[in-house]
C-alpha cells in the first residue's frame, strides 16, 4: 500500500511558547487534557489530521478538536471495532487519524481490529486511549484497564507510549504527527503534576534520567513517574541515593539506559499503574534478564482487577504510592 | 463481441488461473474464489478506473476484498493487470511469496488493505470513502463481503457508519452463495432477509445475478447514480461456479483441486492443456 507523502508542519515557535506558559501556570494537568488541547492546536496547522471517537469525546477530550473542526471529526458511536477499521481506511488514504476511546475498549474490545486492520498493514493510525489504569476511579473495574500496555506491546509494528505529564503528552502527540506508523498512546483521567519543562524533547524509544542516583534505579512510566520522584525523596532522607528514570516509550524500550542503570546501581525497581504482568515491569525484566541481571522488583497492580473508589484512595489500596516504591527499593538494595 | 461476452471470456481465463494456482499451492479457498470472480472481473475490467503503470494513482477507484480468503481471485486479476506476474501466481502460499494466503497490502501494490480476518473490510472501506470525500475526489470504493461474513457484528457497525456519513462513493457487494465453512448459511446461523436488513440499515439495495455480466453491469451502473446513500449489491452466486464438481458444495470451501479435479475443471473451462 502506498501512503501518499504529505507535509507535516508543526506549531510555530511562538505558539509553542505560549502553550508551555499555560502549562506552567497549571501545575497539575491530566494527560488527556493535554492530548485534547494539543490535538486541537495541531489540527489548525495540519489539515491531514482527522479524529475518531466512540461516543466518549467529552471524556477523551477529542471534543475540543471536534468543536473546532467538525468536518474532520468522526463520531463512530459505540462501535470501537468499526472505529479502528475506519481509522485504518482513513490512514491508507493519506490521512493522519487519531482514534480515541477508553483504554479498555480501544485495546480490549478492538484488539484484533488493531492487530489486523492497523498494525499488520502498518497503517498510520494513532490510538490515543484515555482513562487507563485504576485512576478512572468511581466507574470501577469494568472501565479500568490494567492490561492495555501488555496487549498492545505484544503486537508487531506497534509502538507503545505512556507520557508522564502534560508537557510530555504534548511533545508525544506532536511527534505522532511526524512519525509514520501505528502507535498506542496511554493517557490518564486524573490530574497529575507537571514534571517537564520547555527544554524537554521527546524522542521515540528514549528514556530520561530525571534524577541521578547510585544505590538503586526506579524506572517508571505515566503518573507513577512523579510518585517515583517522591519515593526518591523518601529514600534520600534515609541516605539512599535513588536514580529516577522515565521510560515513556514502553516499546521500543530504551535498552541502553536500562542496562546502564543496572550496571551502575545494581538494583532496579519499576513502577506503573498497570498489571505487573506484561507492562513496563515485564519489559524491563526482559531487558535485564537477557543482558544484565540484577535484583529487581515490580511495583504495579498485583494481578487484580480494579475497583470503585476515589482515585487517590485506590492508589493507596493498590500500593501505587511513593512509600511502597521506597519499600521495594529497600528490598532490592538488600538483595544486592 | 458485446461487453458482457468479453467479460465472460476474461472470467473464464481467470478461473483457469485460480484453479492452477490453488492446485500448485495445494491449499486455499476454491469455492469462494470461483463464486466471486465474475464480480471482480466486472469491476476490474469494466467499471474501475486505475492506472496499469501507477497502482498508487490518487484518483483510482478502490477495491477491498473483505472476504480475504478469496485471495486467489484477486491475485488472478492483479496478474492480468500486471500488478504481479503470472509466475508469481504459482508461488501462492509458499514461504517468501508476495502472494500470502490472505491479501497483504505491503506485499503487492494494488492491494489496498490487508484482509483475512472476516468482518473488518467494510470499516476500512468506509475510512477510505471518508478520506476521498474529504479530499473531494471522484473515486469510488468497492468492497466485497461474504454472506457468512455478514454474521460478524462489525459488519453491521460499519453498515451504520456508511449510512450515517452518506457514503455514496461506496458500493459494497455480498457474494450471496448461501454457503460457509460448516454448511449452508441458513443452517449455521441464518442471515435472511439480507436485502431488507441492509435497507433497514439505510442502504440503497440492489439485487443482481452475480454470474450474469449484464446484470452486474447494470447494478454497478445504478449504484453510481445514487446520492447520499451507500449501495449494497446482493449478488446471488453459486459457490464453486464454473466447475461442476465444485458447484454448490460447502466441502470445497477451503479445498484445492486434486490432480484429477484440475484436469476435469480445465476441460470444462476449455483450457489449452499442455
Ligand atoms: C474473523 C474470522 N473468523 C473465522 C474465519 C475463518 N473463515 C474463513 S472463510 C469462513 C467462512 C466464510 O463464509 P462466507 O463469508 O460465506 O465466504 P464464502 O462463502 O464467500 O467463501 C470462515 C469462518 C476468518 N477468516 N475470520
Ligand atoms: Mg458464502
Image: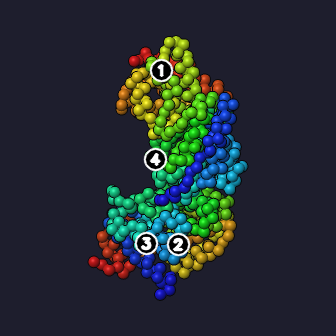
Q: Is residue A283 left or right of residue A38?
A: left
Residue where numbered disc 2 is placed: B49
Distance from disc 4 to disc 3, alpha carbons, whole Å, reads 31 Å
Label 3: which residue? B81
Q: Which residue is mark 4?
A: A157
Neighbor class of circle 3 (other Cα within 10 Å; few <14, some 14-19, many 20+) is some
The vertical placement of A112 against A166, above or below, is: below
Q: Chain of mark 3?
A: B
Q: Residue at x 41, y 70 (%)?
A: B82
Q: Nearer the viewer, residue B61 or B209?
A: B61
Q: Residues within 10 Å of mark 1 (few under 14, many from 20)?
A: some
**Residue B139: x, y in percent?**
58, 68
Q: CA gap, disc 1 to disc 3?
A: 64 Å
Most distant residue in the right direction: A67
User: Which of the colour schemes (rainbow, by chain, secondary structure, one colour) is used?
Assistant: rainbow
B215 versus B60 height, above or below:
below
Q: Which residue carries the number 1 mark?
A: A213
**How much space separates mark 2 and mark 4, taking CA atoms?**
32 Å
Nearer mark to the viewer, of 1 and 3: 1
Amino acid at each position: 500500500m502506498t501512503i501518499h507523502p504529505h507535509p507535516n508542519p508543526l506549531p510555530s515557535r511562538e505558539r509553542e511558547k505560549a502553550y508551555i506558559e499555560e502549562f506552567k501556570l497549571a501545575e497539575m494537568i491530566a494527560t488527556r487534557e493535554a492530548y485534547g488541547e494539543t490535538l486541537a492546536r495541531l489540527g489548525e496547522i495540519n489539515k491531514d489530521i482527522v479524529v475518531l471517537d466512540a461516543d466518549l469525546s467529552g471524556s477523551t477530550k477529542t471534543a475540543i478538536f471536534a468543536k473546532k473542526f467538525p468536518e474532520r471529526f468522526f463520531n463512530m458511536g459505540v462501535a470501537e471495532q468499526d472505529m479502528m477499521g475506519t481509522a485504518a481506511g482513513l490512514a491508507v488514504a493519506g490521512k493522519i487519524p487519531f482514534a480515541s476511546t477508553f483504554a479498555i475498549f480501544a485495546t480490549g474490545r478492538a484488539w484484533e481490529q488493531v492487530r489486523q486492520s492497523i498494525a499488520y498493514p502498518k497503517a498510520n493510525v494513532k490510538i490515543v486511549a484515555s482513562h487507563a489504569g485504576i485512576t478512572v476511579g468511581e466507574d470501577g473495574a469494568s472501565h479500568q484497564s490494567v492490561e492495555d500496555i501488555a496487549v498492545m506491546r505484544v503486537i508487531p509494528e506497534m509502538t507503545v507510549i505512556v507520557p508522564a505529564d502534560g508537557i510530555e503528552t504534548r511533545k508525544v502527540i506532536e511527534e505522532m504527527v511526524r512519525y509514520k506508523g501505528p502507535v498506542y498512546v496511554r493517557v490518564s483521567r486524573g490530574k497529575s503534576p507537571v514534571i517537564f519543562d520547555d527544554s524537554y524533547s521527546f524522542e521515540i524509544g528514549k528514556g530520561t534520567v530525571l534524577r541521578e542516583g547510585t544505590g538503586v534505579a526506579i524506572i517508571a512510566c505515566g503518573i507513577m513517574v512523579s510518585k517515583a520522584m517522591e519515593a526518591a525523596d523518601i529514600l534520600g532522607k534515609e541516605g539512599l541515593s535513588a536514580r529516577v528514570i522515565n521510560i515513556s516509550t514502553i516499546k521500543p524500550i530504551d535498552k541502553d539506559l536500562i542496562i546502564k542503570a543496572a550496571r551502575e546501581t545494581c538494583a532496579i525497581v519499576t513502577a506503573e499503574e498497570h498489571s505487573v504482568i506484561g507492562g513496563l515491569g515485564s519489559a524491563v525484566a526482559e531487558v535485564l534478564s537477557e543482558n544484565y541481571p540484577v535484583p529487581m522488583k515490580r511495583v504495579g497492580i498485583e494481578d487484580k482487577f480494579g475497583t470503585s473508589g476515589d482515585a487517590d484512595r485506590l492508589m493507596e489500596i493498590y500500593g501505587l504510592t511513593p512509600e511502597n516504591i521506597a519499600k521495594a527499593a529497600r528490598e532490592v538494595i538488600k538483595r544486592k | 463481441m458485446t461487453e458482457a461476452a468479453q467479460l465472460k471470456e476474461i472470467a473464464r481465463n481467470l478461473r483457469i488461473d485460480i484453479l492452477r494456482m490453488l492446485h500448485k499451492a495445494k491449499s486455499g479457498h476454491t469455492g469462494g474464489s470461483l463464486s466471486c470472480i465474475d464480480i471482480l472481473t466486472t469491476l476490474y475490467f469494466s467499471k474501475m478506473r486505475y492506472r496499469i503503470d501507477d497502482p498508487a494513482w490518487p484518483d483510482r477507484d478502490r477495491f477491498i476484498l473483505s472476504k480475504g480468503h478469496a485471495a486467489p481471485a484477486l491475485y488472478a486479476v492483479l496478474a492480468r493487470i500486471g500488478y504481479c506476474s503470472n509466475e508469481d501466481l504459482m508461488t501462492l502460499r509458499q514461504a517468501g511469496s508476495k502472494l500470502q494466503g490472505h491479501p497483504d497490502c505491503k506485499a503487492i501494490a494494488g492491494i489496498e488493505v490487508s484482509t483475512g480476518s472476516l468482518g473488518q473490510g467494510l470499516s476500512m472501506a468506509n475510512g477510505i470513502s471518508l478520506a476521498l470525500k474529504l479530499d473531494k475526489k471522484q473515486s469510488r470504493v468497492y468492497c466485497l463481503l461474504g454472506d457468512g461474513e455478514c454474521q460478524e457484528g462489525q459488519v453491521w457497525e460499519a453498515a451504520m457508519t456508511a449510512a450515517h456519513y452518506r457514503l455514496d462513493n461506496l458500493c459494497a457487494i455480498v457474494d450471496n452463495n448461501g454457503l460457509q465453512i460448516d454448511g449452508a448459511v441458513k443452517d449455521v446461523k441464518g442471515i435472511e432477509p439480507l436485502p431488507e436488513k441492509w435497507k433497514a440499515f439505510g442502504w440503497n439495495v440492489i439485487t443482481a445475478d452475480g454470474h450474469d455480466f449484464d446484470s452486474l453491469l447494470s447494478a454497478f451502473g445504478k449504484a453510481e447514480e445514487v446520492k447520499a446513500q451507500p449501495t449494497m449489491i446482493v449478488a446471488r452466486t453459486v459457490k464453486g461456479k464454473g466447475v461442476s464438481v465444485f458447484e454448490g458444495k460447502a466441502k470445497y470451501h477451503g479445498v484445492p483441486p486434486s490432480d484429477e479435479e484440475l484436469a476435469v475443471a480445465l476441460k470444462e473451462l476449455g483450457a489449452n492443456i499442455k
